[in-house]
Amino acid sequence: MLKHAPEVNVEEGLDVRFWGVRGSLPSPGPETAMVGGNTACVEVCGGGSRVILDAGSGIRALGDSLMAKGEGEDLTILLSHVHWDHVMGLPFFAPLYAGKTPITIAAGPLGLPVESALERQMSPPLFPVSYDAVRSRVKTVDLAADRHFRVGALTITMLPLIHPDPVIAYRIAFGSSSVVYATDTEHLEGQLDERLLRFARGADILIYDAQYTPEEYRGEVGPSRKGWGHSTFLAGAELARAANIKTLALFHHDPRRTDAEVAAIVQRCREHFPSTVAARENLSLRVEVPPSVASRHRAELQQVAALP
């Protein structure tokens, strides 16, 4: 059962909290205050374990929260890709500069090692703090696109998505519950992405790139967005319905999209898939995991390789 939850990291549940939900670049201001203007960052917790999905500008507030709670250790960040909006917050992530245990930052194939991408980001004159200043605090992991692994009590599978540069979707499971994070993906016009359909089937929550309306995507409003690597709420609804998803969370909102426009898109989407919400900053969703299922899941964890 899915509930709105004020807290994450509850022992017998899978908890999702959104810290950044925008695409492309931050968009602060009064017209975006309700949904939020920070770029992609999502926290997923279950069974006492945590993974962080992407390191957009929203990760700054997450880092401050973790440090205030004394939870800035043993952190794992999974990057969908390294476009600027998905990594721009990392140099401002407080746990990067404190604590005793390295932060693990992992990603699928990027075309270059994860560490090289981080070095480029944190290098003068682009940024005043060199990556060398935090190198000892970071453990980078380059993953094959088809990896299946665990982070603590969470099991994770991966799928390459359709985008101009390499992007990975993640499915995070605890017990019988799961969340799929599929941002920066472009749908196949007139048909479902069968690979993503199989990957997402039966998930409790699908976090899906809905940057454009169908009209924007086709070029009926402004230039055509075909080939830009993003999708629409309608494609998300069709995928969610076919994959038997319980809740669709529209994500990666266009930076120009106002709160009122996001609300209107949700209403349009609910005509096709009623169980739709807009991802917004500080929204927490919880999927209950029965204790017996959680216990069985823990017993089976030894069969899954840990993240290196």
Image (cartoon, rainbow, N blue to C red):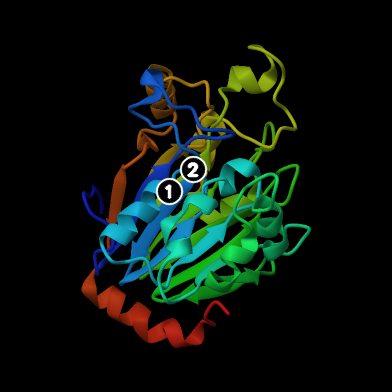
Q: Pointer 2 and pointer 1: residues touching (CB < 8 Å)?
A: yes
Residue shown at 47% from the left, 41% from the top: 241
State the residue in front, 14 or 257: 257
Q: Quadrant of residue 11?
A: bottom left
Residue at mark 1: 60
Q: Picture coordinates of residue 158 (x, y %)?
A: 60, 62
Q: Picture coordinates of residue 268 (x, y %)?
A: 43, 22
Residue 246 appears in the rendering: no
Q: Quadrant of the C terminus?
A: bottom right
State the residue in front, 24 or 208: 24
Residue 48 relative to residue 128: left or right: left
Residue at mark 2: 57
Residue type at tag 1: Arg
Whole-Å distance between the Cαs marked 2 and 1? 6 Å
Residue shown at 75% from the left, 32% from the top: 227
Q: Picture coordinates of residue 197 (x, y %)?
A: 58, 50
Query: Does residue 21 lie above or below 148 as drawn?
Result: above
Classify mark 2: helix, strand or loop. Answer: loop
Q: Which mark is residue 19?
A: none
Mark 2 Cα-neighbour bin, 10 Å: few <14, some 14–19, many ≥20: many
Query: Does residue 192 lie above or below 292 as drawn?
Result: above
Residue shown at 71% from the left, 43% from the top: 163
